[in-house]
Image (spheres, rainbow, N blue to C red):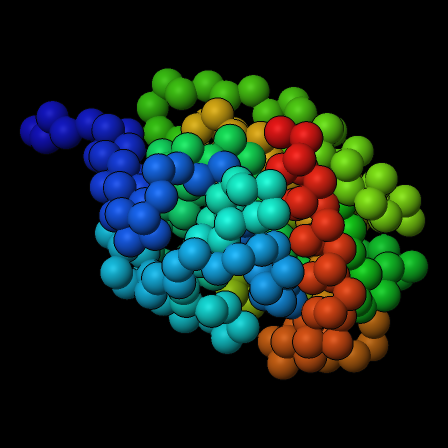
Amino acid sequence: MSTKDPTSEVSQQAQRAAAALLQEAGIESIDLACTLGSGWGEAAEQLGELVAEISAEDIPGFRNSGVPGHSGSLKVIRAASGKHVLVIGARTHYYEDRGVDAVAHGVRTAAAAGAGVVVLTNGCGGLNPAWTPGAPVLIRDHLNLTGVSPLQGAHFVDLTDLYSPRIRGIARRVDPSLQEGVYAQLPGPHYETPAEISYLRTIGADLVGMSTALEAIAARAAGMEVFGISLVTNLAAGISDEPLSHQEVLEAGTAAAPRIAALLAQIITATLEES
C-alpha cells in the first residue's frame, strides 16, 4: 500500500514551479496573480512593464492550454507601484482530463511564489436576460457543481467570504455600475441544456461556466485573497433563441476586450496600491 501523501506531493510541485518561475523572471517574489479567461487577455498589456514572458511548458506542472483564446504563457509584470503581477494565460480546465490538481496548479504556484491575492476571470453564460454579452459581472459567490474538490483528506476550509468583499468594494469604486452574481461551475465541455439552465436559475445561479470555482477553493486553502469577475459572452441556453458556440464566446470577448481590459487593469492597480 502506498504511503505517499498526495497533499505533500502537490505542494512540492507548486514549490518547484514557483522556484523555476522566479528564477526565469529574475525576481524574488510575486505580489498578485491573475488568471485571464476568455476575453480578458488584453488586460496584461495595461498592468505595467513586462519583466518576463515564459512558455508554460518551461515551468514544472504547466502546459499550453488546449482552449482557443488562451495564450499558453506565463507573464511577470512590474506594476507602477513596483509590485510584481503574475499573469497566468495557461489555465487548465477540468474537462481537459488532467485531474483537479492540474486545475489548481496555477494558483498554488502563485501562492508558493508569494502572491497574497489572486484575480480569477472567465467568459461565461449569463442567466439574467438584463446582462447582455459584453457585460462584466463581479462574482459574489459560487456553486461548485463539478462533483470534485481540489482539497484532499481532512482539510476543512471556510468559504463563507471566499470572494473578497474588500476587493469587490475596490472594483465598485472603479466602476459603480458593476453588478454582482453567483457563478456556477459545471464540468463541461458541453454547454448546458435549457432544462439545466432552468435548474441553475432555481438554485440561485446568475452565471455559468467551466472554470474558476475549483481554482478559488484551492486559492483560499493556500491562504490567498480571491477576487473573481466574469465577462458575459452569451446568454445561456433557453434564455436566448440563438445556438451556443465557442466562436460566439471568442467574438464577444474580442468586442469587449478594450473596455474590460482597462477596467480590470484599474481594479488590479488599485488593489496593489491598497495591499
Q: Quadrant of residue 64?
A: bottom left
Foreground of the two, 73 or 186: 73
Residue 30 in sight here:
yes
Q: Position of residue 159 (x, y in %)?
A: 59, 25
Q: How many marks?
A: 0
Q: Residue at x 23, y 34 (%)?
A: 12
Q: Position of residue 41 (x, y in %)?
A: 59, 65
Q: Is residue 121 left or right of residue 72?
A: right
Q: Quadrant of residue 72?
A: bottom left
Foreground of the two, 37 or 262: 262
Q: Residue at x 49, y 44 (%)?
A: 84
Vertical arrangement, residue 240 with respect to residue 52, above or below? below
Q: Residue at x 24, y 28 (%)?
A: 8
Where does the C terminus fall, quadrant-wise?
top right
Where does the N terminus fall, quadrant-wise?
top left
Residue 162 in sight here:
no
Q: Position of residue 254 (x, y in %)?
A: 68, 76
Vertical arrangement, residue 254 with respect to residue 275, above or below? below
Foreground of the two, 137 or 119: 119
Q: Is residue 29 left or right of residue 133?
A: left
Q: Position of residue 161 (x, y in %)?
A: 67, 25
